[in-house]
Each structure stands twice: as C-alpha cells, then as structure tokens.
Image (cartoon, helix red, strand yellow):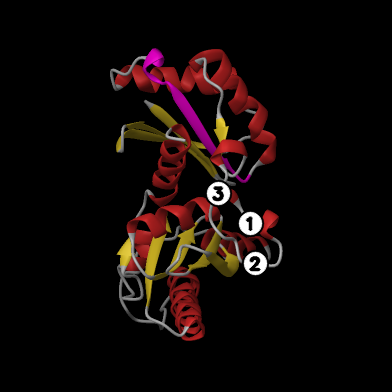
Amino acid sequence: MLLAVDVGNTNVVFALFQGEEMRTRWRIATDPRRTGDEYAVWLQQLMQIEDIRVDQVDGMIVSSVVPRARHNLEVLAQKYFHVEPMFAGEGAAAWNIEIDVEEPHTLGADRAVNAIAAHAKYPGDLVIVDFGTATTFDVVDFNGAYKGGIIATGINLSLDALVSNTAKLPRIAIEDPRSDSVIGRNTEDQMLIGVYWGYVAMIEGLVERVRKEIGRPAKVIATGGLATLFDKHTDIFDVVDHDLTLQGLQLIARRTNTK
C-alpha cells in the first residue's frame, strides 16, 4: 500500500492507496512540532481499527507546504514503515510538467500536485479552485502546463481578521446560509452574509475574469474542505473533487515506481 501525505498549513491528511483505489484517509491538525513517534502512535491505532497492518505499507509520498514538518515525516517513514519517503517535486518524483510562470520554484507543492491530477482526470483547459487556509485559483492549459493563478485569503482567515479586529462582533461558524436573503436582521446573520456571500461573489467574479483571459472554454474544478459548502449556492463549478491532491500524489508515486 502507498501512504500519501498532504501537509497543509491547517491540516495534515494521510491516505492509504491499494493500487489506484483509496482505501481510507485520516486528518490531523498541522503541528510542525509533532514528532515521528507521535504520528506513528496515532496512525497505528487508526490502521488497527481499519484492520490494516503496518507492514502492508510499502511506499510513502509527501506533498508539503510546511518545511518544518519534513524531518518528522522522514522519521515516521524510516523508523516505522521502513521506507524512504518520496517528496513531490523532488528527485524521481519531479513534477514533469511545464510550469510557465516567472518563478517556477516558488509554486506550492499542493498546487502542482493538483495540476497534475486535474489534467490526468479532466480534458481541456482547467481552472482549479482549492479551498484551504488560503483559497487558490490555478490555471492549467489543455497540454497540462501550469500557467499561473491567484492566491486569496481563505474564508476562515477573513472571518478571524474580522472578529479579532473588532471589539463587539461575536465569533461565528461558517455554515450554509439559512436563506438566500442578503439583508441580515441580526448581527450574526449580517456577518455570515458578508463573509459567505461576499466570498461567493469573489469566486464567481475571479473565475469569470480568468475564463475571459484564457479565451477558450475552461472547466472549473473545486477541491478542498469547504468546496461542497460553496457549491450549494453557485453554479460556477463544473466538478467538485475533494481528493484531487491525494490522487495527484498517487499518480506521481505510480509514475515514479514505473520508471
């Protein structure tokens, strides 16, 4: 089995693949101080629940935007799974796609992995919207080249900034609005409307501008934890694909192992 690890700024997602099929996945809060031993205790307990043995894991690939987490994941792979981890974008796990931007080395690993997975799964020009700590928009052309994108503040960061910089506004949860009305009748509803519908307007507006600039029909792929929440109230997405990054890691590992 392949253990795919997606290290984001907020969460680390672990997934086990048996061939091309994802067997299971688990999520834990990102903490660069978490040791390889701590990861191992947590993972081994979860694997036992799923009736999966540690010795069934024969490969590990990591996509990370948190450099400080690297060493502890290397310890996890070497000490507990007895494998050398691959890091997406490095060595045999290099991207092998054209990154047509001014500073290719600055492209986040998660965004490159998403581009690889999306091109493999969906034909034509693509716009990938990933709802993470930041919300990113990535453009991939019909040949699979990464052409650039947009980085916007994630919705939870926007809400945190609003609450932390105002004295009387309460902390609210991001949730499905109770109605389509954009005129709130109390403080909490007004905050939710501002954050949620403001975010929908941003997504729709930016995607429309990106499509116009591409100049050809482009499919819009949404991924990330909050994609479903926004998909309920906009028709801008053609596909919601929650596992895009993990599937991209599986594709890179499979390509690497067949060289």
Query: Dot 2 surroundings within 10 Å: few (below 14), some, or many (20 or more)?
Result: some
Residue 72 drawn at (x, y percent): 63, 26
Q: CA distance from mark 1 to mark 3?
A: 11 Å
Judge whether residue 75 can be spotted in this image: yes
Q: Residue at x 50, y 84 (%)?
A: 209
Q: Residue 26: which numbered mark, if any?
A: none
Q: CA distance from mark 3 to mark 2?
A: 14 Å
Q: Residue furthest front?
A: 259
Query: Dot 1 surroundings within 10 Å: few (below 14), some, or many (20 or more)?
Result: some
In reply to whether residue 157 is colored magenta, the answer given is no
Instruction: From the image, tell me which residue sits under label 1.
Output: 107
Q: Amino acid at mark 3?
A: Trp
Q: Amino acid at mark 2?
A: Val
* Relative to 97, residue 61 above or below: above
* Relative to 228, residue 194 above or below: below
Residue 79 or 99: which is nearer the viewer?
A: 99
Q: Which residues are magenta?
A: 54-65
Question: Which of the marked residues, 1 or 2, is nearer the chain's N terminus?
Answer: 2
Instruction: From the image, tell me which residue sits under label 2.
Output: 101
Residue 78 drawn at (x, y percent): 57, 17
Label 1 residue SS: loop
Instruction: From the image, tell me which residue sits under label 3.
Output: 95
Quadrant in the picture for residue 193: bottom left
Label 2 residue SS: loop
Residue 236 or 153: which is nearer the viewer?
A: 236
Q: Residue at x 51, y 55 (%)?
A: 132
Residue 107 drawn at (x, y percent): 63, 56
Question: Which of the marked residues, 3 or 2, is nearer the chain's N terminus?
Answer: 3
Q: Is residue 204 left or right of residue 228?
A: right
